Amino acid sequence: TDDGIKIDGKVLKVLQVRDPKELPWKALGVDLVIESTGIFTDRDKAAMHLDAGAPLVIVSAPSNGADATFVYGVNHAEFDPAKHKVVSNASCTTNCFVPLVKVLDDAFGVENGLMTTVHAYTGDQQLVDGPHSDLRRARGAAINITPTSTGAARATSLVMAAMKGKLDGTALRVPVPTGSITDFVANLKKPATVAEINAAFKAAADGPLKGVLEYTDAPIVSSDIVTNPHSCIFDSDLTMSMGTLVKVLGWYDNEWGYSNRLVDLTKHIGAKLKA
Protein backbone atom coordinates (compact mmCIF):
# COMPACT_ATOMS: atom_id res chain seq x y z
CA THR A 1 0.00 0.00 0.00
CA ASP A 2 1.00 3.66 -0.05
CA ASP A 3 1.41 3.58 3.75
CA GLY A 4 3.27 0.33 4.26
CA ILE A 5 3.24 -3.45 3.86
CA LYS A 6 -0.09 -5.27 4.16
CA ILE A 7 0.01 -8.73 5.76
CA ASP A 8 -3.18 -10.67 6.58
CA GLY A 9 -5.20 -7.48 6.33
CA LYS A 10 -2.95 -5.53 8.70
CA VAL A 11 -0.86 -2.63 7.39
CA LEU A 12 2.64 -2.41 8.82
CA LYS A 13 3.74 1.19 8.42
CA VAL A 14 7.01 1.79 6.56
CA LEU A 15 8.93 4.94 7.45
CA GLN A 16 11.92 6.71 5.91
CA VAL A 17 13.28 9.05 8.57
CA ARG A 18 16.98 9.78 9.06
CA ASP A 19 16.73 11.32 12.55
CA PRO A 20 15.36 8.92 15.21
CA LYS A 21 14.02 11.86 17.21
CA GLU A 22 11.62 12.61 14.36
CA LEU A 23 10.07 9.13 14.24
CA PRO A 24 6.35 9.05 15.16
CA TRP A 25 6.69 6.41 17.87
CA LYS A 26 4.37 8.19 20.28
CA ALA A 27 1.63 8.63 17.69
CA LEU A 28 1.95 4.98 16.64
CA GLY A 29 1.82 3.79 20.24
CA VAL A 30 4.73 1.37 19.89
CA ASP A 31 5.60 -0.90 22.83
CA LEU A 32 9.33 -0.92 22.12
CA VAL A 33 11.84 -0.26 19.35
CA ILE A 34 14.48 -2.65 18.03
CA GLU A 35 17.45 -0.52 16.94
CA SER A 36 19.10 -2.56 14.18
CA THR A 37 20.57 0.09 11.88
CA GLY A 38 24.05 -0.47 13.31
CA ILE A 39 24.41 3.32 13.51
CA PHE A 40 22.63 4.34 16.71
CA THR A 41 24.22 1.76 19.00
CA ASP A 42 25.57 3.92 21.85
CA ARG A 43 23.09 4.66 24.59
CA ASP A 44 22.91 8.40 23.86
CA LYS A 45 22.12 7.75 20.20
CA ALA A 46 19.70 4.90 20.86
CA ALA A 47 17.93 7.06 23.46
CA MET A 48 16.74 9.34 20.65
CA HIS A 49 14.01 6.74 20.14
CA LEU A 50 12.91 7.46 23.72
CA ASP A 51 12.78 11.16 22.88
CA ALA A 52 10.47 10.25 19.99
CA GLY A 53 8.07 8.48 22.35
CA ALA A 54 9.24 4.87 22.46
CA PRO A 55 9.02 3.38 25.98
CA LEU A 56 12.10 1.16 25.52
CA VAL A 57 14.87 0.39 23.02
CA ILE A 58 16.61 -2.93 22.36
CA VAL A 59 19.92 -2.49 20.52
CA SER A 60 20.79 -5.51 18.38
CA ALA A 61 24.52 -5.02 18.96
CA PRO A 62 26.93 -4.23 21.78
CA SER A 63 25.98 -0.83 23.20
CA ASN A 64 28.30 1.50 25.08
CA GLY A 65 26.52 2.87 28.13
CA ALA A 66 23.40 0.70 27.78
CA ASP A 67 21.37 0.31 30.96
CA ALA A 68 21.93 -3.44 30.74
CA THR A 69 23.31 -6.11 28.42
CA PHE A 70 21.35 -9.34 28.19
CA VAL A 71 22.24 -12.79 26.88
CA TYR A 72 18.96 -14.64 26.66
CA GLY A 73 19.01 -17.82 28.70
CA VAL A 74 21.66 -16.54 31.09
CA ASN A 75 20.62 -13.18 32.57
CA HIS A 76 17.49 -12.04 30.71
CA ALA A 77 15.40 -12.57 33.85
CA GLU A 78 17.23 -9.59 35.40
CA PHE A 79 15.35 -7.17 33.13
CA ASP A 80 13.68 -4.44 35.20
CA PRO A 81 11.29 -2.13 33.29
CA ALA A 82 11.69 0.53 35.98
CA LYS A 83 15.41 1.05 35.34
CA HIS A 84 16.19 -0.51 31.95
CA LYS A 85 15.17 1.79 29.08
CA VAL A 86 18.00 1.15 26.59
CA VAL A 87 19.23 -2.44 26.62
CA SER A 88 21.63 -4.44 24.47
CA ASN A 89 21.20 -7.95 23.08
CA ALA A 90 25.02 -8.18 23.04
CA SER A 91 26.75 -9.63 19.96
CA CYS A 92 26.34 -12.95 18.18
CA THR A 93 29.72 -14.08 19.51
CA THR A 94 28.90 -13.08 23.09
CA ASN A 95 25.63 -15.03 22.82
CA CYS A 96 27.64 -18.11 21.82
CA PHE A 97 30.51 -17.58 24.24
CA VAL A 98 28.60 -16.84 27.45
CA PRO A 99 26.87 -20.26 27.58
CA LEU A 100 30.30 -21.93 27.24
CA VAL A 101 31.63 -19.89 30.15
CA LYS A 102 28.53 -20.34 32.28
CA VAL A 103 28.44 -24.13 32.03
CA LEU A 104 32.13 -24.45 32.88
CA ASP A 105 31.91 -21.93 35.70
CA ASP A 106 28.81 -23.48 37.24
CA ALA A 107 30.27 -26.99 37.12
CA PHE A 108 33.98 -26.48 37.80
CA GLY A 109 34.71 -22.77 38.34
CA VAL A 110 36.61 -20.66 35.78
CA GLU A 111 39.84 -18.96 36.93
CA ASN A 112 40.50 -17.27 33.58
CA GLY A 113 40.50 -17.99 29.90
CA LEU A 114 41.13 -16.96 26.32
CA MET A 115 38.76 -17.36 23.39
CA THR A 116 39.12 -17.24 19.63
CA THR A 117 36.13 -16.91 17.37
CA VAL A 118 36.55 -18.20 13.83
CA HIS A 119 33.93 -15.95 12.31
CA ALA A 120 32.27 -15.60 8.92
CA TYR A 121 33.41 -12.46 7.16
CA THR A 122 31.19 -9.38 7.51
CA GLY A 123 30.26 -6.14 5.81
CA ASP A 124 32.84 -4.30 7.91
CA GLN A 125 35.60 -5.82 5.75
CA GLN A 126 36.71 -4.96 2.24
CA LEU A 127 35.87 -7.46 -0.49
CA VAL A 128 39.08 -6.46 -2.27
CA ASP A 129 42.09 -4.68 -0.80
CA GLY A 130 41.10 -1.11 0.01
CA PRO A 131 41.04 1.59 2.68
CA HIS A 132 40.07 0.68 6.26
CA SER A 133 41.13 1.95 9.68
CA ASP A 134 42.03 -1.66 10.56
CA LEU A 135 44.78 -2.59 8.12
CA ARG A 136 43.94 -6.28 8.38
CA ARG A 137 40.26 -5.68 7.58
CA ALA A 138 41.49 -3.58 4.65
CA ARG A 139 42.49 -6.78 2.89
CA GLY A 140 40.19 -8.82 0.65
CA ALA A 141 37.72 -10.66 2.88
CA ALA A 142 36.90 -13.46 0.46
CA ILE A 143 40.50 -14.60 -0.05
CA ASN A 144 42.10 -14.26 3.39
CA ILE A 145 41.98 -15.44 6.98
CA THR A 146 41.79 -12.06 8.69
CA PRO A 147 42.85 -11.67 12.33
CA THR A 148 40.99 -8.86 14.06
CA SER A 149 39.64 -7.78 17.42
CA THR A 150 36.49 -8.80 19.27
CA GLY A 151 35.04 -7.44 22.47
CA ALA A 152 32.95 -10.57 23.07
CA ALA A 153 35.16 -12.02 25.81
CA ARG A 154 35.45 -8.79 27.79
CA ALA A 155 31.72 -8.13 27.31
CA THR A 156 31.00 -11.35 29.18
CA SER A 157 31.52 -9.47 32.45
CA LEU A 158 28.48 -7.34 31.57
CA VAL A 159 26.43 -10.53 31.80
CA MET A 160 28.46 -12.47 34.38
CA ALA A 161 30.01 -9.93 36.75
CA ALA A 162 32.29 -12.53 38.35
CA MET A 163 34.18 -12.84 35.04
CA LYS A 164 35.38 -9.23 35.05
CA GLY A 165 39.10 -9.12 34.18
CA LYS A 166 39.32 -12.89 33.71
CA LEU A 167 38.63 -13.27 29.99
CA ASP A 168 40.02 -11.97 26.71
CA GLY A 169 39.78 -12.97 23.10
CA THR A 170 40.46 -12.41 19.43
CA ALA A 171 38.77 -13.13 16.11
CA LEU A 172 39.74 -14.78 12.84
CA ARG A 173 37.45 -13.74 9.99
CA VAL A 174 37.24 -16.44 7.33
CA PRO A 175 35.71 -16.60 3.81
CA VAL A 176 32.35 -18.21 4.57
CA PRO A 177 29.07 -16.24 4.32
CA THR A 178 27.75 -17.40 7.71
CA GLY A 179 28.48 -20.10 10.27
CA SER A 180 31.11 -19.49 12.95
CA ILE A 181 32.77 -21.31 15.85
CA THR A 182 34.09 -20.17 19.23
CA ASP A 183 37.18 -21.85 20.69
CA PHE A 184 37.53 -21.33 24.46
CA VAL A 185 40.58 -22.36 26.48
CA ALA A 186 40.01 -22.04 30.23
CA ASN A 187 41.86 -22.59 33.47
CA LEU A 188 39.42 -24.25 35.85
CA LYS A 189 39.36 -24.09 39.64
CA LYS A 190 39.28 -27.89 39.81
CA PRO A 191 40.30 -30.63 37.37
CA ALA A 192 37.75 -32.02 34.94
CA THR A 193 37.91 -34.88 32.47
CA VAL A 194 36.54 -34.74 28.94
CA ALA A 195 33.67 -36.99 30.01
CA GLU A 196 32.83 -34.75 32.98
CA ILE A 197 32.92 -31.60 30.85
CA ASN A 198 30.72 -33.12 28.16
CA ALA A 199 28.28 -34.38 30.78
CA ALA A 200 27.95 -30.87 32.21
CA PHE A 201 27.15 -29.45 28.78
CA LYS A 202 24.68 -32.24 28.00
CA ALA A 203 22.85 -31.56 31.26
CA ALA A 204 22.72 -27.82 30.57
CA ALA A 205 21.51 -28.33 26.98
CA ASP A 206 18.73 -30.63 28.20
CA GLY A 207 17.93 -28.43 31.19
CA PRO A 208 18.36 -24.73 32.05
CA LEU A 209 19.85 -23.74 28.67
CA LYS A 210 17.48 -25.79 26.51
CA GLY A 211 16.73 -23.88 23.31
CA VAL A 212 19.85 -21.72 23.72
CA LEU A 213 22.57 -24.37 23.95
CA GLU A 214 22.56 -27.50 21.77
CA TYR A 215 24.75 -30.55 22.37
CA THR A 216 26.07 -32.59 19.45
CA ASP A 217 28.46 -35.50 19.01
CA ALA A 218 28.10 -35.52 15.21
CA PRO A 219 31.18 -34.73 13.05
CA ILE A 220 29.73 -31.47 11.73
CA VAL A 221 31.23 -28.59 9.75
CA SER A 222 30.15 -24.96 9.50
CA SER A 223 27.54 -25.39 6.75
CA ASP A 224 25.71 -27.93 8.93
CA ILE A 225 24.74 -25.29 11.49
CA VAL A 226 23.46 -22.63 9.09
CA THR A 227 19.86 -21.77 10.14
CA ASN A 228 20.34 -23.55 13.48
CA PRO A 229 18.35 -21.41 15.95
CA HIS A 230 20.56 -22.07 19.00
CA SER A 231 23.03 -19.51 20.32
CA CYS A 232 25.69 -22.18 20.77
CA ILE A 233 26.02 -25.70 19.37
CA PHE A 234 28.47 -27.45 21.70
CA ASP A 235 30.73 -29.86 19.77
CA SER A 236 31.49 -32.60 22.30
CA ASP A 237 33.92 -34.38 19.97
CA LEU A 238 36.31 -31.41 20.16
CA THR A 239 36.55 -31.17 23.96
CA MET A 240 40.09 -31.44 25.39
CA SER A 241 41.40 -31.60 28.95
CA MET A 242 44.75 -31.57 30.73
CA GLY A 243 43.68 -31.41 34.36
CA THR A 244 42.52 -27.87 35.01
CA LEU A 245 43.43 -26.67 31.49
CA VAL A 246 40.54 -27.36 29.13
CA LYS A 247 39.32 -26.48 25.64
CA VAL A 248 35.68 -26.40 24.51
CA LEU A 249 34.20 -25.31 21.19
CA GLY A 250 30.74 -24.14 20.18
CA TRP A 251 29.34 -23.43 16.72
CA TYR A 252 26.85 -20.67 15.93
CA ASP A 253 25.02 -19.22 12.96
CA ASN A 254 26.09 -15.65 13.60
CA GLU A 255 23.02 -14.33 11.76
CA TRP A 256 20.14 -16.77 12.26
CA GLY A 257 20.96 -17.85 15.80
CA TYR A 258 21.40 -14.26 16.94
CA SER A 259 18.13 -13.20 15.32
CA ASN A 260 16.29 -15.94 17.20
CA ARG A 261 17.66 -14.66 20.52
CA LEU A 262 16.66 -11.11 19.60
CA VAL A 263 13.09 -12.35 19.10
CA ASP A 264 13.21 -14.23 22.41
CA LEU A 265 14.47 -11.18 24.31
CA THR A 266 11.89 -8.94 22.64
CA LYS A 267 9.04 -11.28 23.60
CA HIS A 268 10.32 -11.51 27.18
CA ILE A 269 10.66 -7.75 27.57
CA GLY A 270 7.34 -7.11 25.83
CA ALA A 271 5.57 -9.42 28.27
CA LYS A 272 7.21 -7.65 31.23
CA LEU A 273 6.19 -4.24 29.92
CA LYS A 274 2.56 -5.36 29.67
CA ALA A 275 2.51 -7.15 33.04
Image (spheres, rainbow, N blue to C red):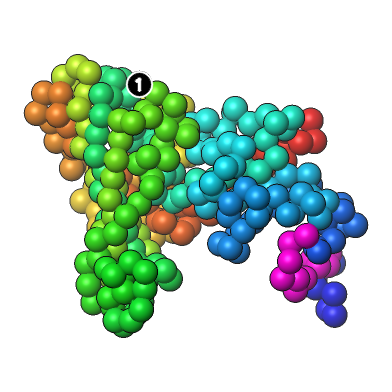
- Residues shaded magenta: 10-21
Q: Residue at 37%, 69% (x, y): give it.
A: 133
Residue 206, percent from left and from top: 41, 30
For disc 1, the neighbor class at 10 Å (few under 14, some 14 to 19, many from 20) is few
Residue type, numbered disc 1: Asp
Answer above or below: position of 146 versus 105: below
> Quadrant of the image for the N terminus?
bottom right
Q: Residue at 58%, 55% (x, y): give it.
A: 41
Secondary structure beneath label 1: helix
Q: Residue at 32%, 24% (x, y): give it.
A: 105
Q: Is residue 269 left or right of residue 123?
A: right
The quarter of the picture where residue 15 lies is bottom right
Q: Residue at 81%, 64% (x, y): give it.
A: 22
Q: Does any portion of residue 131 appear in the rendered image?
A: yes
Residue 20 within the segment the image draws in magenta: yes
Q: Nearer the viewer, residue 21 or 107?
A: 21
Location of mark 1 (residue): 106
Residue 59, percent from left and from top: 60, 51
Residue 250 within the segment the image draws in magenta: no
Residue 68, percent from left and from top: 58, 36
Residue 204, percent from left and from top: 38, 28
**Count of numbered circles on the image:** 1
The quarter of the picture where residue 203 lies is top left
Q: Is residue 143 left or right of residue 259?
A: left
Answer above or below: position of 221 versus 214: below
Q: Nearer the viewer, residue 203 or 65?
A: 65
